[in-house]
Amino acid sequence: MKRPFNLVILTLFGCLLLLGCQNPPSTEKSNSGVASASITATPEPAPVETELVRSGLISEYLETTSNVYANTEVVVYPKLPGQVDRVLVEEGDEVKKGQVLAILDDDEYALKVRQAEVNKNQAQEKADRLKKMYDGKMVSQESYNDAMYVLEESRVAYELARLDFAYTRVKSPIQGIITNRSIQIGDLVSNSTAAFEVLNPQSLMVDVYLPERETARLESGMAAAVLPVSIPGMKFKAMVKRINPIVDPQTGTQKVTLAFDDDIGQLTAGMYVRVQILLRSRSNAVLL
């Protein structure tokens, strides 16, 4: 009769074992005053930066890209055929209008000037002699007129010879900078030989092609800025010089030409640039 007693003892032992495996009570109390089983950490506040509202200038720009080009750029050709005797300038040199860039061999042309001068002097002497004879009724009107015609022809031939001699000096037709020299001493050239290229840096411009809806907001004289991509931080003042009224039917754009102020600094033809055209600006605007 001991089996029921043993069963009771085993049951009590199992209950005590289960009670011992439970978590200990927390010291934190709930709203009802009973201890809670968890603790919640209070999050730290996030930092917030404040700034005073201020007023200032705000502007709206139309931006695009393009390349700088020279509006005045010429190719210099010799006016006579010949052999290059001297080259007086190099690429990068600044030149004035009419400055001699190169000299062709001028020996033959110098002799032609002397020959023409001799013929002119002879014609002048003959004309003077016939005039005295004509005044003395010793020669006919026809003989006198013929002498005067010969004199005039000799004067023209002399001037042409001098002009040809002057053409042995290859000159720059504009003021600017030599951007290309294609000849050297000893070269045989003709009037179709491109000898030099001269660019006027004061004629630098920028053409941009904008949609019709954008050009409708532009007008001549608007301020602009040109920023060379190769020179970070550099900005050059410009202005809208003209707006082509014709719309390209293929692209739907119009050409807008910008001209620079006098100070062009390090700008050169061919530079890739960003262009900003000022559309409008407002002062005392609220800035955040």
Image: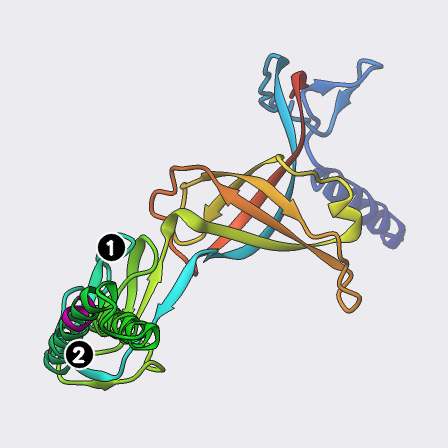
Query: Circle 2: is it few (<14), some (14-19), or many (20+) Cα within 10 Å?
Result: some
Q: Position of residue 70 (x, y in %)?
A: 44, 56
Estimate the x, y position of residue 71 in percent, counting from the top left: 48, 55
Badge 1: few (under 14), some or many (20 or more) residues near its Cα, within 10 Å? many
Image location (x, y in percent) of residue 163: 25, 69
Of residues 141 and 10, the one drawn nearer to the viewer in this rendering = 141
- To which quarter of the image does residue 208 belong? bottom right
114 part of magenta stretch: no
- Mark 1 highlights which residue? 95
Which circle's residue, 2 or 1, is located before the other in the chain? 1
Question: Please, which residue is most extreme toward the front here?
Answer: 137
Specify the color scheme.
rainbow
Q: Secondary structure at mark 2?
A: loop
Q: What residue did someone put label 2 on?
A: 184
Q: Are marks 2 and 1 in contact (CB under 8 Å)?
A: no
Q: What span is in magenta? A: 124-128
In this rendering, is residue 97 above or below 53?
below
Please give left or right for residue 99 compared with residue 266 in the image.
left
Spatial CA distance of label 2 from label 1 is: 18 Å
Question: Residue visible at 32% across and 52% down?
Answer: 175
| Magenta-drawn stretch contains 126 | yes
- Disc number at residue 247? none
Task: Say whether residue 62 is left or right of residue 115.
Answer: right
SS at circle 1:
strand
